[in-house]
Amino acid sequence: MNFRFLEDDKKAHLRRGLFFRLHDESRRLTFGAEAMSDLPYLYSSNRLPPLHPSHKSVATVSGGSVAPEFERIDEFLAARGIKPEAYARYSVQREIVRRYGGKFVHTDEAQQRSYVGALVDLGMIWAVISTYGEMRKLPGDFRTAFFHDAAEQSTGGPSKGRDTLVEYYASARFKAAGCAIRKAEPDFMCSSRGLEFGLAVKRFKIGNLEQHVRKARRQIEGTNRAGVIVLDVTQSSPMMHTPFHGTLDQFRAEAKTWMDEHFYGPMRRNWKAWQLDQRKIPFVVCFHHGVCFLGDGTTARLSQMYNFSLAPVHLPSWSEKAMIDTVHHVVESVRRTLPEAAP
């Protein structure tokens, strides 16, 4: 087996741990368009296939050539005999996009917020069903949450439907990266290179990151397997509550600054106190979705993934090194499915 960790001495492994910390620190300090362009996959297309040919992480969804997701979702559902309830999340968000699409200039801020939330939801729903497209029958909880249960319209608060969407979106990204996926504790189990590891998926608000990280850690530990903590901060993003008007570069810069403050910063300061150990949880990843109203009258939806690599509390065994290498390969593959991704 060709592992990344081949040097059988403590210094080599410690150098690698130092590299991850220095790499993460350099990513934080490198701010500005010129510096960002020198790093791989940082806010630019990585020229690798997206999740699905008709789902791109940076997509012009109003006034451009990309058809609205709901048209493809409608076709998908019709082929399976699924008729969404009129009050269901999908139906409500679909109607918002149909009604306001291409007309945001003439709507007020409240309508723009509804439009942004609907675009994000529909984009994530399409990402899931296009990835699981070979299935004739959608998973029951996903089908119920989006095509039957009434939609919750508040943003940032508790939402079983959004929790379900975030969980299945994470599983879709890992499936697109080549993993075999099954629904099991902690939320999903992934299999790659003969290794099975868990995904503990949480939506978090900026005030309860610690609570969700600790809960995810306990869920992973309860499986007696390694795992990845997958977070989603979209509903707490200021860009969901105040419609963002500007350029893509301005959106990316503001998103980066906000994520540095509310994700990378707390993780750097607290990962030891939160009892995270690379030998059990090699990575914490965080998704952030948003919509940018561009000056030319189009609307762009962006999906971004941020990775935080952990250091070992104690020197890993050979089997733990093999696990870390495999999970690192998978997380990198997940990252490479998004044109918008940060190291």
Image (tube, rainbow, N blue to C red):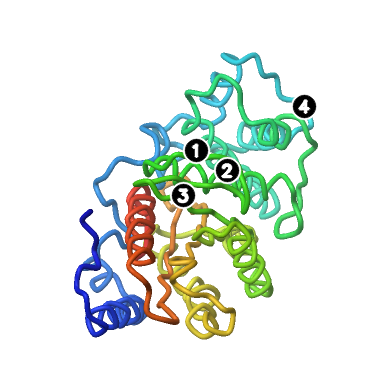
Q: Residue 291: where, in percent of width, then height?
A: 51, 52
Q: CA distance from mark 1 to mark 2?
A: 9 Å
Q: Residue at x 57, y 79 (%)?
A: 275
Q: For this rendering, which residue is in front, 127 or 250?
A: 127
Q: Residue at x 41, y 69 (%)?
A: 253
Question: Considering only order in the chain, which callout, 2 or 4, is on the residue closer to the N terminus?
Answer: 4
Residues at discs 3 and 1 in contact (Cβ within 8 Å): no
Question: Considering only order in the chain, which callout, 3 or 4, is on the residue closer to the N terminus?
Answer: 4
Q: Residue at x 71, y 44 (%)?
A: 161
Q: Residue beneath label 1, please?
A: 127
Secondary structure of the residue carrying numbered label 4: loop
Residues at discs 4 and 3 in contact (Cβ within 8 Å): no
Looking at the rendered image, the disc whose residue lies closer to the viewer, 3 or 1, is 3
User: Which mark identifies residue 339?
Assistant: none
**How dense is the environment of label 2, judged by Cα within 10 Å: few (below 14), some, or many (20 and up)?**
many
Q: Residue beneath label 4, please?
A: 86
Secondary structure of the residue carrying numbered label 1: helix
Looking at the rendered image, the disc whose residue lies closer to the viewer, 1 or 4, is 1
Secondary structure of the residue carrying numbered label 2: helix
**How dense is the environment of label 4, judged by Cα within 10 Å: few (below 14), some, or many (20 and up)?**
some
Q: Is residue 65 left or right of 83 when viewed as pictured? A: left
Query: What's the residue type where badge 2 is placed?
Result: Tyr
**How dense is the environment of label 3, judged by Cα within 10 Å: few (below 14), some, or many (20 and up)?**
some
Q: Residue beneath label 3, please?
A: 196
Q: CA distance from mark 4 to mark 2?
A: 22 Å
Looking at the rendered image, the disc whose residue lies closer to the viewer, 4 or 2, is 2
Q: Residue beneath label 2, please?
A: 168
Residues at discs 4 and 2 in contact (Cβ within 8 Å): no
Residues at discs 1 and 4 in contact (Cβ within 8 Å): no
145 relative to 282, above or below? above
Query: What's the residue type where badge 1 is placed?
Result: Ala
